[in-house]
Image (cartoon, helix red, strand yellow):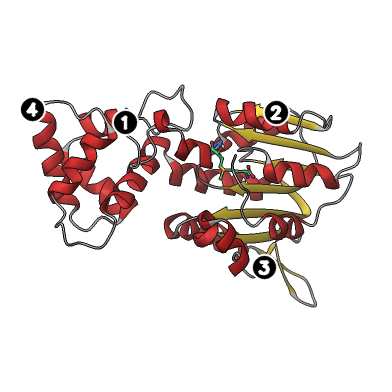
């Protein structure tokens, strides 16, 4: 079961009104959604989105006693479409807890982890056509180099891509452990750094188009949130956080001039990090960061 990160801090930052309307864009196993639902009365409503059918199954069971939730299977990049399709009005808060849930990582067959031998998959939405197998076996060496460099900050990305192309010309690279072997071949045995982590991060981002959708979806959230409403975003690595910071900053530049003052459209709050206790209890939280923004007018 996925353990929610920065849970108390997120719920506090959303400043939940009991009759409010909220959207949890990353339902996962429903941890944050449950905390939001606990604070709502019968007139409040929560819409929760996830693209992963497995996650939705787990969350549905967890949240089965609540009537005021609508679960949507889809990609949060389509947030605006869901808002009009479900006629969602007066949105008081939108939450993004970006990334993968623990069972995506810990279920061998999903192919997200270098720790288990399984087919190269990594799709959060298992209906998607692109998977890690296709990226590894069909992308050109230049494309692979670019992905490893951009999304994984892999130092020897060119060397690694060349090795991948060489290896797959003999036999397709089907499984994670086969890929690990190629990664080993370009990394000196004495290197202390985990060579797999960055490569797998890069592949995951490419397969799920993660960075592109974050940027678009957060902008849609800011466009649709009500006055005084808040958008809260939890990220897990600097590439994601840079995007969130960028979208927030761009929107913060909007203001109107009144005779007395400049009135800015958005206000951001101080970023929140997990406590030492949370990191001790849940190692996954160690790199998490929560950013919050409120619409002023
Ligand atoms: C970190 S988990 C969320 C955990 C959740 N907050 C909880 O407390 O259980 C992220 C979830 O977001 C989903 N997800 C990631 N990117 C998505 C996207 N673009 N559209 C919809 N769901 C997405 C993943 O499938 C995963 O279940």
Report crowding for label 4: few under 14, some 14 to 19, many 20 or more residues within 10 A (C-alpha).
few
Question: Mark 3 sits on what residue?
Answer: 269
Question: Horizontally, is 237 left or right of 91 in the view?
Answer: left
Question: Mark 4 sits on what residue?
Answer: 170
Rounded to the nearest whole Å, what is the CA distance between mark 1 and mark 4? 18 Å
Furthest toward the right, the residue is 42
Question: Mark 2 sits on what residue?
Answer: 60
Q: Secondary structure at mark 3?
A: loop
Q: Secondary structure at mark 4?
A: helix
Question: Mark 1 sits on what residue?
Answer: 120
Pair 4/3: label in front: 4
Report crowding for label 3: few under 14, some 14 to 19, many 20 or more residues within 10 A (C-alpha).
few
Comparing 244 with 109, the one in front is 109
Rounded to the nearest whole Å, what is the CA distance between mark 3 and mark 1? 40 Å
Question: Residue 126: horizontal and vertical position, in percent?
Answer: 46, 24
Rendered residue at 33%/44% (across/down): 200
In which image quadrant can residue 208 be found? top left
Report crowding for label 2: few under 14, some 14 to 19, many 20 or more residues within 10 A (C-alpha).
some
Question: Residue 120: horizontal and vertical position, in percent?
Answer: 31, 31
Labelled disc at residue 75: none
Report crowding for label 1: few under 14, some 14 to 19, many 20 or more residues within 10 A (C-alpha).
many
Q: How many marks?
A: 4
């Amino acid at each position: 079961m996925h353990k929610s990160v920065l849970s108390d801090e997120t719920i506090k930052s959303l400043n939940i009104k009991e009759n409010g309307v909220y959207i949890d864009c990353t339902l996962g196993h429903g941890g944050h959604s449950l905390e939001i639902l606990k604070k709502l009365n019968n007139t409040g409503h929560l819409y929760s989105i996830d693209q992963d059918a497995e996650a939705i199954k787990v969350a549905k069971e967890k949240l089965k006693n609540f009537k005021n939730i609508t679960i949507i299977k889809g990609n949060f990049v389509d947030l605006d479409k869901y808002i009009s399709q479900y006629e969602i009005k007066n949105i008081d808060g939108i939450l993004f807890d970006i990334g993968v849930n623990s069972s995506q990582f810990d279920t061998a067959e999903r192919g997200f982890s270098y720790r288990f031998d399984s087919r190269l998959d990594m799709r959060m939405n298992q209906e998607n056509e692109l998977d890690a197998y296709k990226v590894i076996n069909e992308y050109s060496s230049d494309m692979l180099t670019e992905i490893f460099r951009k999304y994984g900050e892999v130092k020897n990305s060119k060397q690694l891509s060349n090795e991948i192309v060489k290896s797959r010309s003999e036999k397709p690279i089907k499984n994670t452990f086969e890929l690990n072997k190629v990664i080993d071949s370009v990394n000196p045995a004495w290197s202390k750094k985990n060579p797999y982590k960055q490569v797998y991060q890069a592949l995951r981002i490419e397969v799920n188009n993660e960075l592109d959708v974050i940027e678009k979806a957060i902008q849609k959230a800011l466009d649709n949130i009500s006055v005084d409403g808040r958008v809260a975003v939890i990220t897990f690595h600097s590439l994601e956080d840079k995007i969130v910071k960028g979208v927030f900053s761009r929107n913060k530049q909007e203001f109107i001039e009144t005779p007395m003052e400049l009135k800015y459209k958005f206000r951001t709050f101080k970023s929140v990090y997990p406590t030492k206790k949370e990191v001790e209890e849940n190692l996954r939280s160690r790199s998490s960061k929560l950013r919050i923004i409120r619409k002023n007018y």
